[in-house]
């Protein structure tokens, strides 16, 4: 009988390796071009390419991040000249971000790096296998966070008077 895959271990191990791989790729690009976007910054650039003027909430949803993380991310990217932030004309509490020429200039190298990574990730798998993997990963993304199981009641030492 074949042992069942250890899903949690496999996912965590794959995620750590992917993060290391992306960090090494980022360091390589930075050594060639200077300042390379982090994976999260690259995500913002790609989202803004398709949805320029997105709100922080829209960016958070597209990147699966909390809004407070996106605000800091956008602030750092604005300091680099990659995006411009501005309060919404309809609601001053809502900030929107726009892709700037310096940010757009980052995209060709990012596309090249992603093509190389995606090519290695998918090498040796059929289209049908990749569609199954994609469907499973999307399923995992849709799962709600489980409610924590209630802790057992501690034993009560009842002392008779």
Image: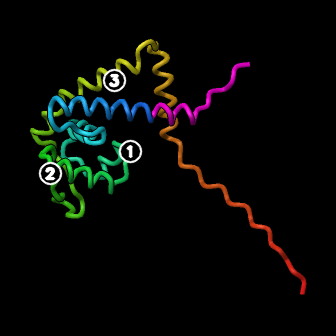
Give the labeled residue for mark 2: 79
Name the secondary structure under disc 3.
helix
Residue 35 position within the rendered picture, expressed as x and y whole percent measured from the top left: 17, 38
* Residue 1 placement, left or right of 103: right
Disc 3 crowd, CA 10 A, few/some/many (<14, 14-19, 20+): some
Asked which secondary structure carries label 1, the reply is loop
Residue receiving disc 3: 117
Q: Position of residue 55 (x, y in %)?
A: 25, 51
- Which residue lies most toward the right here? 160
Query: Tag 2, which secondary structure?
Result: helix
Query: Which residue was labeled with disc 1?
Result: 64
Would residue 161 appear left or right of 50 to someone viewing this image? right
- The stretch in magenta equals 1-15
User: Picture coordinates of residue 109 (x, y %)?
Assistant: 19, 27
74 sits to left or right of 10: left
Mark with earlier residue (1, 3): 1
Residue at x 46%, y 20% (from the top left corner): 130
Q: Work out how far the residue at label 3 is from the one at label 2, CA to CA, in angstroms.
A: 28 Å
The secondary structure that most of the magenta stretch takes on is helix
Residue in the image at 26% along x and 33% along y: 26
Which residue sits at x=74%, y=19%?
A: 1
Earlier residue among tags 3 and 2? 2
* Residue 52 coordinates in the image, percent (x, y): 19, 42
Towards the viewer: 30 or 90: 30
Q: How far apart are marks 1 and 2 (CA)?
A: 23 Å
**Crowding at mark 2 (Cα within 10 Å: few <14, some 14-19, many 20+):** few
Quarter of the image for residue 111 reads top left
Quarter in which the C terminus is drawn: bottom right
């Amino acid at each position: 009988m074949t042992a069942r895959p250890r899903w949690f271990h496999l996912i965590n191990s794959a995620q750590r390796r992917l993060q290391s791989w992306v960090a090494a790729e980022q360091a390589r690009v930075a050594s060639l071009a200077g300042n390379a976007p982090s994976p999260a910054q690259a995500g913002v650039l790609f989202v803004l390419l398709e949805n320029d003027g997105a709100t922080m909430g829209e960016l958070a949803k597209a990147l699966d991040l909390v809004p407070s993380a996106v605000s800091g991310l956008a602030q750092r990217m604005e300091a680099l000249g990659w995006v411009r932030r501005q309060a919404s004309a309809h609601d001053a509490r809502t900030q929107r971000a726009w892709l700037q020429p310096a940010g757009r200039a980052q995209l060709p190298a990012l596309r090249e790096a992603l093509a190389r990574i995606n090519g290695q990730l998918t090498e040796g798998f059929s289209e049908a296998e990749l569609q199954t993997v994609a469907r499973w990963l999307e399923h995992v993304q849709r799962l709600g966070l489980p409610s924590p199981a209630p802790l057992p009641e501690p034993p009560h030492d009842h002392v008779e008077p």
